[in-house]
Amino acid sequence: MENLYNILGIAPNATPDEIKKRYRAMAMRFHPDRNSDEGAQARFNAIQKAYEVLSDGQLRADYDQKFNDRIVLDAEAEAYELWRSVFAFNGVKV
């Protein structure tokens, strides 16, 4: 299961205003009309999906419940992915 909070680079306790602000910044950064990088379209689509779920109160509650109830098979890989998303958001390639 993909961590939607990592996609937007926000904490799970982010407010709706923080989610909206981060979405707008990232959508502008990765919009295909502004960014010609190879993975920009895929990243933009992931950002849109994350925003759709996290900006809707009921969808966010359902997502949080499913995400918190899952079984973590590889905690080290999940931690690595979290750090990788933080570095990637700040423009550092890992």
Image (cartoon, rainbow, N blue to C red):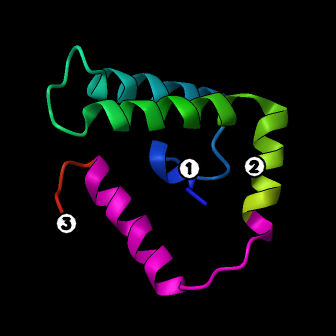
Residue under pointer 1: 5
Residue at image location 64% in from the left, 80% down from the top? 72
Residue at image location 46% in from the left, 38% down from the top? 46
Residue under pointer 3: 94
In the rendered image of this protein, does residue 74 appear above or below residue 7? below
- Say which label, 3 or 1, has the lower sequence index: 1
| Badge 3 amino acid | Val
Whether tag 2 and tag 1 are in contact, CB under 8 A, the answer is: no
Mark yes or no: residue 87 visible.
Answer: yes
User: Which image quarter: residue 81?
Assistant: bottom left
- Say which label, 2 or 1, has the lower sequence index: 1
Q: Which residue of the protein is positioned furthest toward the top in this rendering?
A: 33
- The spot of residue 49 in percent (x, y) is 56, 33
Verify whether residue 26 appears in magenta: no
Cα separation between marks 3 and 1: 19 Å
| Badge 1 amino acid | Tyr
**Magenta stretch mostly in which secondary structure?**
helix
- The spot of residue 30 in percent (x, y) is 29, 29
* Left or right of 63 on screen, residue 78: left
- Say which label, 2 or 3, has the lower sequence index: 2
In the rendered image of this protein, does residue 86 appear above or below residue 61? below
Secondary structure at badge 2 equals helix
Q: Which residues are magenta?
A: 68-89
Residue 66 vs residue 12, the one in the foreground: 66
- The spot of residue 16 in percent (x, y) is 67, 30
Identify the image quadrant of the C terminus. bottom left
Residue 26 vs residue 13, the one in the foreground: 26
Verify whether residue 71 appears in magenta: yes
Mark yes or no: residue 18 visible.
Answer: no
Residue under pointer 2: 63
